[in-house]
Image (cartoon, helix red, strand yellow):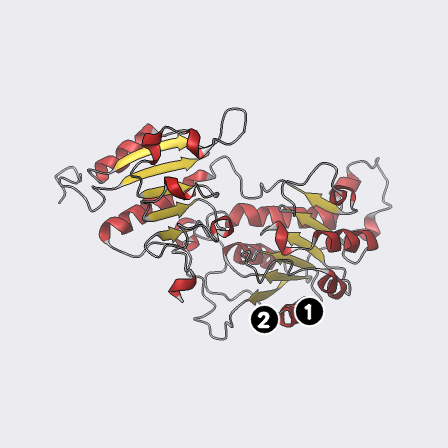
Amino acid sequence: MLDKMGTTTQNSALSKDKLLLFFPKEPDAEWIKKITTKYPGLEVKWANSVKDDGSFVNEKDLPAEYWEDTTLLFVDYLPPPVELISKVRFVQLAAAGADAWLGHPTYLRKETVFSNASGLYSPQIAEWVIGTWLMNQRQFLKYQNLGDGESSLFSNVESSYRLRMGILGYGSIGRQCARIANAMGMEVYAYTRSERKTPESRKDNTYRQFCVPGTGDPEGVIPSKWFHGASKEDINTFLAQDLDILVISLPLTKDTEKVISYKQFEILSRKRTFVSNVARGRHVDTQALIEALEKGQIRGAALDVTDPEPLPKEHPLWKAPNVYITPHISWITKDVWNGGMQLLETNLERLNNGEPCINYLTRSFDT
């Protein structure tokens, strides 16, 4: 029931819940007031998961009252110890990937609903993909050191127009990469695990459509060709399509670990494909990548993720030619958490109304 001011006047369905926000942002008193006013009885705790020096806060260092009786959890990526979240019934991840939770007892508990942040970071990650691709194609780093009138590199610069982008994993990130590539006059090939034969099956039904309008490929109409399959042979067929750039945007599973290795680089060498990885470092065999770069099998690589991660200062990948490496920051902007908070608010409302959550994560027991 609402009063004349639009405020709930009776306890909500969340009245017995306790929400804990544990992520890298200082508590927002106004936000907490807004949520507790909308859902009377809901208790909210908020702790910044990062210290002033940039180090992470250990979950067990928080006062016990933060974790005690917590039933709703908003967390950036890494799972807290299971004993701290034994009563949690809903987890909202601020990250798109859930691989860190695989095998965690809470994740394996059917009663606990999980939602990820798929679609929230697509615009900024796609900008990173296209930006590093253009930096390589236009050879910006080489040109900045040239004097006036020097043109020895002109013949090596190649326009993106009519080149081909292959996207391994056509989710929200891949679709936004496709949108930008299409605007640049590039051809796009898409790869998905399951077959997308019909126009309806090619549509994007993720949360991205609700919070980032005007982005991506919601109808699935940009790719000129679609490929699918779960086997290495299927993937190799896709890689053999004379791709100028390969964008890796897959979720990490046991089946996709080291999906790009020696054989795959050999296939990519036919076109000297540029490799861009914004998914997980373990998708790519690092030693095979180093050798592919050193041998010139690929024209270069842009890596926002590595294996291992973080990459040690003395690791040989740093010295490989034509490689651009950043420390898993392609998704970060100054307002990066706004979308996550919006998604959390949307799902709190759905929980209150008994509706399915946006970005519900399907697990093995759901299939």
Q: Position of residue 102 (x, y in %)?
A: 48, 53
Q: Quadrant of the C terminus?
A: bottom left
Q: Quadrant of residue 201?
A: bottom left
The label on residue 341 is none
Callout 2 secondary element: strand
Callout 1 secondary element: loop
Front in this rendered view, residue 109 or 131: 109
Q: Residues within 10 Å of mark 2 (few under 14, many from 20)?
A: many
Earlier residue among tags 2 and 1: 2
Residue at numbered disc 2: 227
Q: Which residue in the rendered view is the most extreme toward the front?
A: 83
Q: Quadrant of the N terminus?
A: top left
User: What's the residue at 73%, 46% (across, down)?
Assistant: 323
Q: Position of residue 330 (x, y in %)?
A: 58, 43
Q: Amino acid at mark 2?
A: Phe
Residue at numbered disc 1: 241
Q: Position of residue 3 (x, y in %)?
A: 12, 39
Q: Amino acid at mark 1?
A: Gln
Horizontally, residue 308 falls left or right of residue 269, namely left
Horizontally, residue 109 falls left or right of residue 7, namely right
Q: Is there any visible trace of residue 174 in the rendered image?
A: yes
User: What's the residue at 65%, 72% (across, down)?
Assistant: 233
Front in this rendered view, residue 156 or 92: 92
Front in this rendered view, residue 41 or 353: 41
User: What's the residue at 36%, 32% (across, down)?
Assistant: 46
Front in this rendered view, residue 73 or 327: 73
Q: Are marks 2 and 1 in contact (CB under 8 Å)?
A: yes
Q: Residues within 10 Å of mark 1 (few under 14, many from 20)?
A: some
